[in-house]
Image: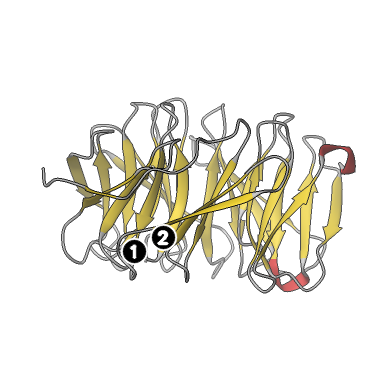
Amino acid sequence: MLPGRRSRPAHPQPPGSVWFTELQGNRIGRVAPGGAISEYALPDPASKPHGPAVATDGNVWVAESGSDRIARITPLGVITEFPLSHGSGPAHVVQGADGNIWITESGRHRIGRMSLSGEVLDEFPIPTRQSNLNGIAATPDGGIWFAEPDANKIGRVSANGDFREFAIPTMRSSTAHLIGMPDGSVWFAENGASKIGHLTPAGRFTERPLPSRGGGSSTVAADRTGAIWVTEPRAARVVRVSPAGDVAEFPIPGSDPVGIVVGPDDTVWVAEDDGNQIARLLPPAV
């Protein structure tokens, strides 16, 4: 393993903080529950970070698609970069049930696995090449799920490298983001169809149109009640679908919301591409 590169330490992480990446700014950001934002510059100015994924040890992992590296940032703000193979084009990362970091390598059409110390353990070639690997999610049963937007598929790989691929019923769904659920299923966003979808480990799909039919759906998140949150960038809205199927919409004018995450206290945080801001939806608003 090649040695990682490190940056200087910063301030400790406040409890309940949420992390985000700045694609154009080559930084990793952190927003505290009260709204204060801290930013940490990555050593490589061409990193183009995506993610992030918070591991069980408190460290945060980020894919650097522009520099073929994976970055790790500690709660104290120390950044270490670990190189991947040239041209790997890492898109997203997630911690699997095995404790390791799993990576979609879009440039090499592979799913990578890295230890928490930064050692590349495996790289599994996916069955469908040129599928433009993107989002990745983990489920408690050990499954690693990934989005293949150009192939209109969702794939699953086991810890020993066995693959299954599932064709999304809606053509040209442009699915690039998904999240794992406790029951082993995944929810995913269909940006090209303005839908959200659900896929079980057995391969059963359920799709649901969103209220703003032309609003798109770029990213999804889940809260502790099992409700699904989804961003509609072209409609400048965030949608919540309850476990019972009730739908609520929350407008964020002029925002182009592209990322969403639910914090430990069920506060919903939204990244605004147009506004260059982070929006917050407090739990009472639900």
The quadrant in which residue 265 appears is top right
Depicted 258 relative to depicted 143: above or below:
below
- The spot of residue 77 in percent (x, y) is 42, 43
Numbered-mark total: 2
Amino acid type, callout 2? Pro
Q: Which residue is mark 2?
A: 49
Provide the secondary structure element on which disc 2 rests. Answer: strand
Nearest the viewer among 28 and 160 is: 28
Task: Return the mark for residue 126.
Answer: none
For the N terminus, which image quadrant? Answer: top left
Q: Are marks 1 and 2 in contact (CB under 8 Å)?
A: yes
143 lies left or right of 22: left
Q: Is residue 257 left or right of residue 149?
A: right
The residue indicated by pointer 1 is: 65
* Quadrant occupied by the C terminus: top right
Provide the secondary structure element on which disc 1 rests. loop
Give above or below for 265 relative to 66.
above
Question: Which of these two is toward me, 235 or 188?
Answer: 235
